[in-house]
Amino acid sequence: MHWRAAVKIAYDGRKFMGSQRQPDLPTVESEVISALTQIGAISTIDESRFGFASRTDKGVSALGNVVAFDTEFRRECLLQALNAASENIYYYAVAEVPDTFYPRYAKERWYRYVLPERNKDEELLRACASLFEGTHDFTRFCRPDGKDAVKTIKRIDVEHRNGAYIIDIHSREFLRNMIRRMVAAIDDVSLRHTDIEDVKKALEGEDKTFGLAPPEPLILMDVIYDFEFQKENPEPLVKKLNVCRDDVLCRMEFLDSLLNREHITK
């Protein structure tokens, strides 16, 4: 039976050169398309009307990006087959969607940036973050690439935990590098390297820039639509997640030992 599938995917951005296909480079799209082709879920990109919800740059991770495609593959077997065929991408939820569905047209996108707390003024950090809420011209905080730079940030939440500031940013859409430029400004203000008034002036159109925050602490948490996805835990997914968890535990033990130097004897 022919149907259109929307699939939630997660990935560690450090393993890819971004999400978009690039010749001879590991990208998220390339691995997804390779897995879909390998299991026989699609024959060609054009015939399947393959689409991607959100572009992520090199180093940026995702917990809830979305791909969509036409297929005749059995729905109850799809996630299991994709997880078995794909090494670095986690497929964990699926929905049958209308033929007209295109994943870029989402209701909301939620990004998270993890900013280390070192030497930051929390009051200034929160004050600067709040400046970006609402509708603004983000020309000084993005690469517009010919697109309208007036966007609306629905809300920004800041939480201080585990030695970092967790900055959650919600909007229907973002422009290229927009979040990383916003975070760079927030970071500069919190470190007292930049006056908060300069950020206000940049939002009002003055020619001021604040650099680009690193991509690795940025995570696409979710892409939200007007329908629900059905979450699954197929065995290949659980196996991959257990391997990932074990690797994290080993790395944490290594870092703790290095920080404490407990292995050094007099």
Image: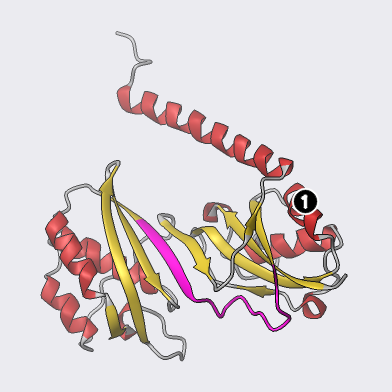
- Drawn side of residue 111 relative to residue 198, left or right: right
Give the extent of the magenta segment: 96-113
In the rendered image, is residue 112 in sight? Answer: yes
Task: Name which quarter of the figure residue 49 lies in.
Answer: bottom right
> Which image quarter holds the C terminus?
top left
Picture residue at 79% right of the left edge, 52% below the top: 81
Q: Is residue 110 magenta?
A: yes
Could you classify mark 1 by the number of other residues whose Cα lies within 10 Å: few (under 14), some (14-19), or many (20 or more)? some
For this rendering, which residue is in front, 253 or 54? 54
What x and y, as percent, mark residue 129?
Answer: 23, 67
* Residue highlighted by disc 1: 85
For this rendering, which residue is in front, 137 or 119? 137
Task: Name which quarter of the figure residue 43 lies in.
Answer: bottom right
Picture residue at 46% right of the left edge, 73% below the top: 108
Task: Name which quarter of the figure residue 134 lies in.
Answer: bottom left
Q: Of helix, strand and loop, which one carries label 1?
A: helix
Picture residue at 55% right of the left edge, 52% below the top: 12
Instruction: Inspect the image, locate mark 1, and give the three-letter code of the amino acid beneath it.
Output: Ala
Give the vertical position of 91 relative to 97 (above or below). Answer: above
The colour mode here is: secondary structure
- Drawn side of residue 235 relative to residue 93, left or right: right
